[in-house]
Structures are given as structure tokens and as C-alpha cells.
Image (cartoon, rainbow, N blue to C red):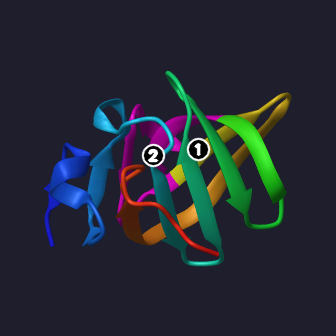
Amino acid sequence: MTAVSTLAQASDRVCEGIDLRHVAPFTTLLVRTANSLYRVVIAEGPHVYVQGGTYFPDPTLACLDGVSMSGHGVTGGWIRVGLALEIRSGEHWVVTSPVLGIAARSSSNPITH
């Protein structure tokens, strides 16, 4: 697996990293960390709707600040395997356990429930 910069390269498959600046709004990412599974829906700008883990039981508007290693060295706009996600929502700031995998689904591929 390799890091990718666009959704066209990551659509409907697992990847090691993705640059959120190149992901279309309404795209859904499933991000598995060491402790949780997060569903991230891309909104506009740095905003996402995130659901999962202890702090986000329901879809919550948040800013995905990027990834870091042990809370240091934020890389804005990226999600990468092996690094923690940093998520801000209101006054809450959450640093996840390390990302183990990412699956992307393009907004052009409808999901049936």
C-alpha cells in the first residue's frame, strides 16, 4: 500500500495515507485506529463530520487538524497509517490512538442501507 494524494487514487480501497485537501465533500472515510473505528464524512474546508470512538457517538461537526506522533508534529490535512488523528470539536480536542487503516468511498458511489 502507498500514500495517495487524491480520492481517485484511493476510491473504494484501503490506503496508507490521504491528503484531505484533495477529497471531495461528502466523501466517507472509515478510519480504523488501534482502539476505535471512526466514520469521517468530508464537509467543506477543514471541517468533517466524525462518528466513532468514545467522544463521538453521534455524527459531530469537527475540524480534523491532521496527524501526529504522540501529540507532536501535526501534519495538517493528512490522515496516515501509524499516526494519531487530532480532532477538534467545540472546546474538545481529541488525539486518537494510531491509525491502522483507512478505507475511502467516493461520494459518487451511493451507499444503500
How busy is the neighbourhood of tag 2: few (under 14 within 10 Å), some, or many (20 plus)? many
In what quadrant of the picture does the N terminus appear?
bottom left
Q: Amino acid at mark 2?
A: Val
Q: Residue furthest top?
A: 45
Q: Position of residue 113 (x, y in %)?
A: 64, 75
Is 60 on the left-hand or right-hand side of 63? right
Going from N to C along the chain, the mark reached first, 2 or 1, is: 2
How busy is the neighbourhood of tag 1: few (under 14 within 10 Å), some, or many (20 plus)? many
Is 84 on the left-hand or right-hand side of 52? left
Q: Secondary structure at mark 2?
A: strand
Q: Which disc, if any, is residue 42?
A: none
Q: Which disc, if any, is residue 67?
A: 2
Question: Is there a contact, CB below 8 Å, between mark 2 and mark 1?
Answer: yes
Q: Secondary structure at mark 1?
A: strand
Query: In terms of depth relative to the viewer, which is nearer, 50 or 80?
Result: 50
Query: In terms of depth relative to the viewer, which is nearer, 51 or 3?
Result: 51
Residue at image mark 1: 86
Residue drawn at the location 78% of the way across and 44% of the way down: 60
The range drawn in magenta is 63-84
Is residue 70 in sight in this rendering?
A: no
Residue 81 falls inside the magenta stretch: yes
Residue drawn at the location 15% of the way across and 55% of the way down: 9
